Image: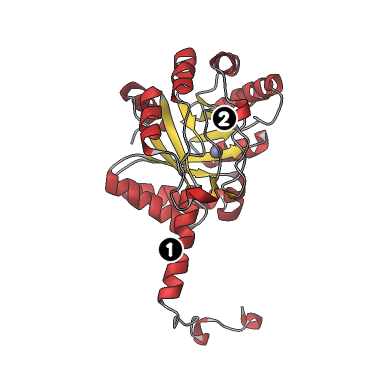
Amino acid sequence: MRSLQQTLAHAQESGTALGHFNVADFTMFKAVCAAAAELNVPVLLGLSESEREFIGVPEIVALVSAFSERSTVPIYLSADHTHSLPKAIEAVRAGFDMVVFDLSALPFDENIARTREALRTLKAINPQFLVEGEIGDIGAGSFIHVDAPTVNASLTGSEEARRFVIATGVDILAPAVGNFHGMRTNMLTGQSRKRLDVQRIREIKRATGSPITLHGGSATDDEDLRAAIEAGINIIHINTELRVAWRKGLESTLSDQPGEKLLPTRFCPPSSTR
Ligand SMILES: [Zn+2]
């Protein structure tokens, strides 16, 4: 199987992008792996700090290892939105393939200094481990926003992107290019879609030459996604749309089967006997 580094290099050369899908439970994990196998494409599974806390770091690594033995496509693990070096070290030691090291809330120069330090530490543990750096403001959390987040005020410029990539040595860059985390309520019904600043992506690509990630890809206009990949995006994050699908699936299954009973009592021994 190709390493993530090789797969990403191939994406750079061929002008394509990898899907990065967040999983918060085993159902989502199976769904993403099944979809990747059906489409015959490699896939990145993303787990933020809180998603890792819920599933468990060794548990998700063991799951991916077990699935990879039978999988016809590579399954990679990404420690999504990691805000501290100890959490990144935990991920690299456990066997993750990459980290989204996110200090974008800090002042720019402090973000550079601490990302560079993290990169040195993490590569010393595993030189194949990839480190993505974050700049700009794209909001936080995979939520449904009633009010539009004000993220367009801090779009990433190509010069700051170039400075960040050179100064830190990151393998991958995540800029702010019109994208944001979560979805607006009117995006649930398809009434509106996110629009991207494709020209800005092209300029950032030209200035850095780096693989680029698009975060907050849920509910983005399809044509904008295609144009963004053509302009240089190599990884696309989707989380909120998966959560919406998870909830809709659960709700419709429960309402379709209102007579569904709880487990028979013989399967549920009293707590005193456990
Ligand atoms: Zn993100």
Please name the amino acid that badge 1 sits on.
Gly
Q: Residue furthest front?
A: 191
Can see residue 136? no
What crowding class fits label 2: few (fewer than 14 Cα within 10 Å), some (14-19), or many (20 or more)? few
Tell me where residue 11 sits by quadrant: top left
Circle number at residue 263: none
Image quadrant of ligand 1 equals top right
Q: Quadrant of the C terminus?
A: bottom right
Q: Is mark 1 within 8 Å of ligand 1?
A: no
The label shown at residue 125 is 2
User: Going 49% across and 85% down the picture, which residue do you hit?
Assistant: 264
- In which image quadrant can residue 157 be found? top right
Looking at the image, is 185 positioned above or below residue 217?
below
User: In the rendering, at what x and y percent does residue 256 appear?
Assistant: 40, 75
Q: Which residue is under mark 1?
A: 249
**Label 2 CB sits under 8 Å from any ligand 1 atom:** no
Circle 2: residue type: Ile
Which quarter of the rendered picture does the N terminus lie within? top left
Residue 189 coordinates in the image, percent (x, y): 45, 53
Q: Nearer the viewer, residue 36 or 5?
A: 36
Q: CA distance from mark 2 to mark 1?
A: 41 Å
SS at badge 1? helix
Where is residue 6 drawn, in percent x and y?
37, 27
**Could you tell which of marks 2 and 1 lies nearer the N-terminus?**
2
Looking at the image, is mark 2 or mark 1 nearer the viewer?
1
Q: Is residue 178 visible?
A: yes
Residue under the point 62% across and 26% down: 154
Residue 123 in picture, x, y percent from top left? 55, 26
- Residue drawn at 59 percent across, 38 percent down: 81
Instruction: Please count the marks in the image.
Output: 2
Examine the rendered structure and indicate whether residue 165 appears above or below residue 95: above
- Left or right: residue 28 versus residue 132 is left
